[in-house]
Image (cartoon, helix red, strand yellow):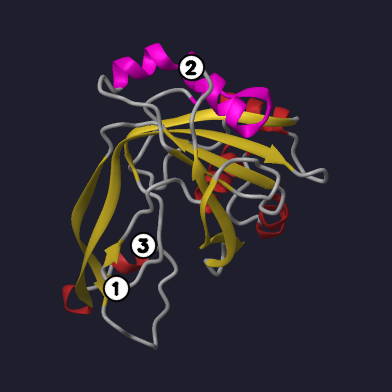
Amino acid sequence: MSRYLLFQLYAPLASWGAAAVGEVRHTEVIPTRSALLGLLAAALGIAREQEERLNQFNQHYHFAVLPLSSREQWLRDYHTIGVPRENKKRTYYTRRDELTLIPEDVGTMLSSREYRCDAYYLIAVRETPDAPETIESLAQALLTPIFPLYLGRKSCPLALPLSPKIVEGSLAEVFSTAEKALDQDLALLFPDRTSPAICYWEGSEVQMELIESRLRSDQPISRKRWQFSTRTQHCGKYGRSE
């Protein structure tokens, strides 16, 4: 029997960064590992500049995700951004430095950003034996976060409390119990909701009917250099017990 930190994520807009190539910033369907680690680190008050502490923190938690929205949609937002023209002789340390340029030195970059709309997820977190923070301390941090929390982008604030709690059981049991407890609330949010078909997890301890395993490039290596490595994520059939 395992112990999990269970909490909910819901917002009108969420963006789970995929590989950014060219002018389009795509979003994954479910929260990335880097986004969930960032959410917990922000709640604890770990600053982005604390590279060593972040690297230590990012190695010690396994996540499982159960999507529960029945009317989730996809949105693309079009942007134009003023950026400096290429000038190898000048270094820009802040956005303020860029904005003080004369108009002739400023160009325009076009980009599109994708979002998930009306998405709702249950997140289960399991700690490793040598984790720097217990799931109890993570739960307390989610109740009283030090830094503002958002779902992927600063323009995606939370629309519901995280409602963290510590639960015990198999992953399927934990999700099933939580989903049944939420039935009435979810019926108000999503009137046409049906029970979810699949969930996602990492680690080899979960016993669930496996559909596929895939590599995802969302394990943070360095926040300063914006580098990530791959990890294995599993997807399996989910059916709650009645």
For marks 2 and 3, the one nearer the N-term is 3
State the image quarter where residue 20 is shown: bottom left
Residue at label 2?
A: 180
- Relative side of 166 to 149, left or right: right
Q: Residue at x 37, y 27 (%)?
A: 159
Q: Residue at x 40, y 31 (%)?
A: 68
Mark 2 vs mark 3, foreground winner is: 2
Residue contact at pointers 1 and 3, CB within 8 angstroms:
no
Q: Position of residue 179 (x, y in %)?
A: 48, 22
Mark 1 vs mark 2, foreground winner is: 2
Magenta span contains residue 194: no
Residue contact at pointers 1 and 2, CB within 8 angstroms:
no
Report the disc number at residue 95: 3
Q: Residues within 10 Å of mark 3 (few under 14, many from 20)?
A: few
Q: Position of residue 83 (x, y in %)?
A: 27, 70
Q: Position of residue 57 (x, y in %)?
A: 70, 50
For marks 1 and 2, the one nearer the N-term is 1
Magenta span contains residue 185: yes
Q: Position of residue 122 (x, y in %)?
A: 49, 31
Residue 141 visible within the image? no
Residue at label 1?
A: 22
User: What's the amino acid at mark 1?
Assistant: Gly
Instruction: Tell me how far mark 1 sits from mark 2, CA to CA.
Output: 43 Å
Q: Residue at x 36, y 48 (%)?
A: 15
Q: Which residues are magenta?
A: 162-189
Q: Secondary structure at mark 3?
A: helix
Residue contact at pointers 2 and 3, CB within 8 angstroms:
no
User: What's the amino acid at mark 3?
Assistant: Arg
Q: Is residue 87 above or below residue 22?
A: below
